[in-house]
């Protein structure tokens, strides 16, 4: 027998793109992608408590840019709630609260993580039993990165990024994550990609060597295969990022890469100890100010407490 849920907390991870191949802009303004998503252990938590009304609150450290997250109906969590409620013909109710740790506008899909967490939490809170296929379809309507936040792990993303297929990954990969105090607009980076690469192919090519590297579990092979087509436009818009990548690599990281559309930079390391050593060296430089260590792959949006 199912019992009505009084409240629960859902945890959803940040993502990085181990490979991000971008094709020529489509007629709908979106870009065809061939990307390899990777969920890392940096999470937003969303709690939801039963209530006759609707409210959404948020807390998070200043250094992740949480002051820039819109509330008052403009949050992607409001949209997720409205979409799920409309799908089932139910009312939008509940007291929701986001505890944010994923950098805002950082290229780590924090908003998408919150949207995925809201779908999972409200499906339980409202006792809807939405099918996985329907949840994934609703997620895709909320944003290109949202289906991956439900699935987690390491997965191929095609279409505009919303078609997600898990891939074989035999590594535990260790990352140094370097935050940037100022966000970077995803549409602006894609627009600059169009300016830099007017002859981009209609379909981005496969990422066979990267997939083989993941299957092998060898961090050196993965380091050599990582690629991001949005890195060149991100460097143009933010020249400091190129210096940051060089700085992390000179401190011994196997490879640095801009995460998605940036400005967060991620550095692959050989092991947890190696990642902590590289992070410590970067912190000793006092610039950049915020340096984290995370590993992957980790699970997609999942319930952590149930009331
Ligand atoms: C670049 C990526 C790489 O994973 O992530 P972030 O760096 O933002 O985290 C994604 O493509 C971001 O996905 P997401 O942030 O969900 O984008 P959406 O809400 O669907 O779209 C926001 C805007 O990004 C651009 N966009 C997004 C996806 C895509 N395949 N082509 C695009 O051109 C469009 O300008 C669109 O209006
Ligand atoms: N719950 C949310 N968390 C973060 N940003 C949100 C949220 N809801 C709406 N936004 C808006 O979406 C923008 C991009 O969010 P985010 O997912 O953090 O970045 P990115 O697309 O670079 O991964 C933010 O600048 C903010 O205006």
Image (cartoon, rainbow, N blue to C red):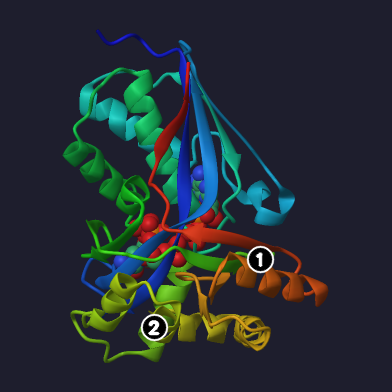
At 60% from the left and 68% from the top, the residue drawn is 176
Kindly identify which residue carries mark 1.
182
Of the two numbered discs 2 and 1 in the rendering, the one whose residue sits closer to the viewer: 2
Spatial CA distance of label 2 from label 1 is 32 Å
Which mark sits nearer the N-terminus, 2 or 1?
1
Helix, strand or loop for disc 2: helix
Kindly identify which residue carries mark 2.
221
Give the x, y percent position of residue 171: 39, 66
- Comparing 273 with 267, the one in front is 273
Residue 213 in which image quadrant: bottom left
Whether residue 22 is visible to the viewer of this picture, yes or no, is no
Q: In the image, is 206 to the left or to the right of 82?
A: left
Give the x, y percent position of residue 70: 57, 44
Helix, strand or loop for disc 1: loop
- Comparing 105 with 305, the one in front is 305
At 62% from the left and 62% from the top, the residue drawn is 293
Mark 1 crowd level (few <14, some 14–19, many ≥20, 10 Å Cα):
some
């Amino acid at each position: 027998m199912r019992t009505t849920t009084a409240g629960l907390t859902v945890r959803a991870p940040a993502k990085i793109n181990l490979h991000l191949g971008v094709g020529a802009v489509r007629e709908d303004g979106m870009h065809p992608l061939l990307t390899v998503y990777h969920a890392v252990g940096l999470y937003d938590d969303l709690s939801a408590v039963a209530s006759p009304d609707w409210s959404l609150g948020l807390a998070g450290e200043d250094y992740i840019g949480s002051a820039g997250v819109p509330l008052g109906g403009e949050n992607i969590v409001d949209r997720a709630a409205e979409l799920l409620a409309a799908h089932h013909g139910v009312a939008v109710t509940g007291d929701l609260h986001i505890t944010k740790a994923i950098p805002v506008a950082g290229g780590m899909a924090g908003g998408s993580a919150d949207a995925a967490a809201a779908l999972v939490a409200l499906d339980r809170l409202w006792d809807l039993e939405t099918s996985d296929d329907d949840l994934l379809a609703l997620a895709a309507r909320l944003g290109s990165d949202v289906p991956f936040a439900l699935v987690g792990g390491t997965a191929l993303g095609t279409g505009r990024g919303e078609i997600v297929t898990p891939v074989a990954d035999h590594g535990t990969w260790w990352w140094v994550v370097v935050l940037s105090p100022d966000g970077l607009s995803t549409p602006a980076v894609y627009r600059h990609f169009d300016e830099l690469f007017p002859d981009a192919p209609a379909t981005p090519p496969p990422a066979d060597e990267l997939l083989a590297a993941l299957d092998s579990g060898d961090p050196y092979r993965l380091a050599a295969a990582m690629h991001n087509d949005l890195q060149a436009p991100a460097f143009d818009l933010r020249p400091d990022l190129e210096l940051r990548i060089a700085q992390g690599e000179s401190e011994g990281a196997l490879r640095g890469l801009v995460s998605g559309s940036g400005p967060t930079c991620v550095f692959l390391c050989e092991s947890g100890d190696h990642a902590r050593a590289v992070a410590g060296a970067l912190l000793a430089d006092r610039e950049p100010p915020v340096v984290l260590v995370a590993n992957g792959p980790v699970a997609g949006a999942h319930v952590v407490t149930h009331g």
